[in-house]
Amino acid sequence: MALRDTLHRFPWGELKYVLWLPVYLLSFLMMERVVVTGYWPTQTWLDSHIPFCEWFVIPYCLWYPLLVAVGLWLLRKDRAGFRRYMRFLALTFFLSEVIWLLVPNGQDLRPAVMPRDNPFTRLAASLYAIDTNTNVFPSVHVVGAIGAAWAVRKTPSLRDRPLLQQAVSLLACLICLSTLLIKQHTVLDVASGIGLALAVGLPLYSQHRLRRFRPAFGRD
């Protein structure tokens, strides 16, 4: 009986909203092997003034559990919010791939030799080995971090937890900053990531807000 109740309560209808993820990951891996040379370098003179700081590899890596944790929380507490969150990620991630296809890009900022030897520089070097320096404009790390913070801000069950909302927003800011400080992205990559997140998120969440207040307008 307990198993039957659990299966009945499971949000089966929301599973279709994550079907885009394996498609995105597969296409991302393919694109990582297509663009190797001949790309548009996105670094500018501003990036040369940003120091390498290996400590920021920690918030950079926290991006992955952040996106998963927000998704699981929304799936349990706010299914409408989960669907908006998945739409935001799917739209922004696939639009990023379209941009990469149309404008092959990369950056040449990674240090050839790490300035120090410690666990954080070794972790950064491991990231370099796994993730290429191409397909960086816009930064999906920036887009995803903003999307997670936005979703938490818009979750009704978390309105009475402002400290948690602020903590997630702070982590999102640190993640965006980390992309610059471990030389994974450039200023242009971050700016374009913010622009893409706003271009998709503003109409997506504004539409949700208008739907909430439409009945009130109709009574006037």
Image (tube, rainbow, N blue to C red):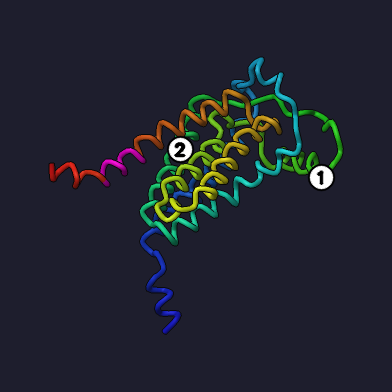
Q: For this rendering, which residue is in front, 7 or 99?
A: 7
The residue segment tinted magenta is 205-212
Looking at the image, which residue is at 58% across and 26% down?
A: 105
- Residue 206 highlighted magenta (yes or no): yes
Residue, disc 1: 119
Residue, disc 2: 92
| First reached walking from the N terminus: tag 2 or tag 1 | 2
Vertical placement of residue 116 versus 216, above or below: above
The location of residue 206, given as percent across then percent down, is 33, 38
Q: Residue furthest top?
A: 45
Q: Residue furthest right?
A: 117
Vertical placement of residue 140 versus 163, above or below: above
Q: Quadrant of the N terminus?
A: bottom left
The location of residue 49, given as percent across then percent down, is 71, 19
Q: CA distance from mark 2 to mark 1?
A: 33 Å
Quadrant in the rendering for residue 220 = top left
- Residue 89 highlighted magenta (yes or no): no
Looking at the image, which residue is at 54% across and 48% down?
A: 163
